[in-house]
Image (cartoon, rainbow, N blue to C red):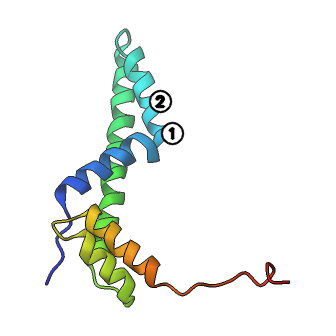
Amino acid sequence: MERKYPVKYFCMFVLTNFLFHYFYLFVPGVILCIIGIWSKPCLAAGLAILILDLILSVIEQLKLRRAAVSKSDSPEFNKIMDAFCSPGGLHATGEVLEEMLKNAPVVEDSEKNQ
């Protein structure tokens, strides 16, 4: 079965990257666009910065999408990505992670025992 990356998550994550990951591009772009109300060169510079921000956000999300849909050598990662790319999406991924945490071996801290 080939994985299909959910489109709604792709768009949501691009928007998140646009607003928060490349915050250093978003804020000056918005400020220059606001100043651009009175000055056309500032508007052009602000729009150019926001377009660059959007392009970088899409490129990063495409890289993440490629990693999510390709098969890995790790069976745990494959199980998580199969759940994420299923119709259940994030909810199914959460269930898989909870199951994996319940089945994980407990490792005690050696310093606590001393």
Q: Position of residue 95 (x, y in %)?
A: 32, 70
* Residue that sits furthest to the right in the current view: 114
Q: Are discs 1 and 2 less than 8 Å apart at CB? A: yes
Quarter of the picture holding the N terminus? bottom left
Closest to the observer, 69 or 90? 90
Residue 33 place in picture, x, y as percent: 37, 22
Residue name at image x 23 percent, y 64 percent:
89
Q: Which mark is residue 49?
A: none
- Secondary structure beneath dot 2 equals helix
Q: Residue at x 39, y 88 (%)?
A: 74
Left/right of residue 113 with respect to residue 60 in the rendered view: right
**Residue placed at 39% from the left, 17% from the top?**
34
Real-space Cα separation, disc 1 to disc 2, in angstroms: 7 Å
Q: Is residue 84 above or below residue 8?
A: below
- Image position, residue 114 (x, y; %): 86, 83
- 25 above or below 7? above
- Label 1 residue SS: helix
Name which residue lies at 58% across and 84% down: 106
The quadrant where residue 92 appears: bottom left
* Amino acid identity at mark 1: Tyr
Residue in the foreground of this view, choosing between 76 and 112:
112
Q: Residue type at mark 2: give it.
A: Pro
Q: Residues within 10 Å of mark 2 (few under 14, many from 20)?
A: some
- Label placed on residue 28: 2
In the rendered view, does 60 fall on the left or right side of 25?
Answer: left
The crowding category of the residue bearing disc 1, from other C-alpha atoms within 10 Å (few below 14, some 14 to 19, many at least 20), is few
Image quadrant in which you'd find residue 26: top left
109 or 48: which is nearer to us?
A: 109
Whole-percent x and y of residue 43? 35, 21
Give the numbered dot on residue 24: 1
Residue 110 falls in image quadrant = bottom right
* In this picture, residue 4 sits left or right of residue 105: left
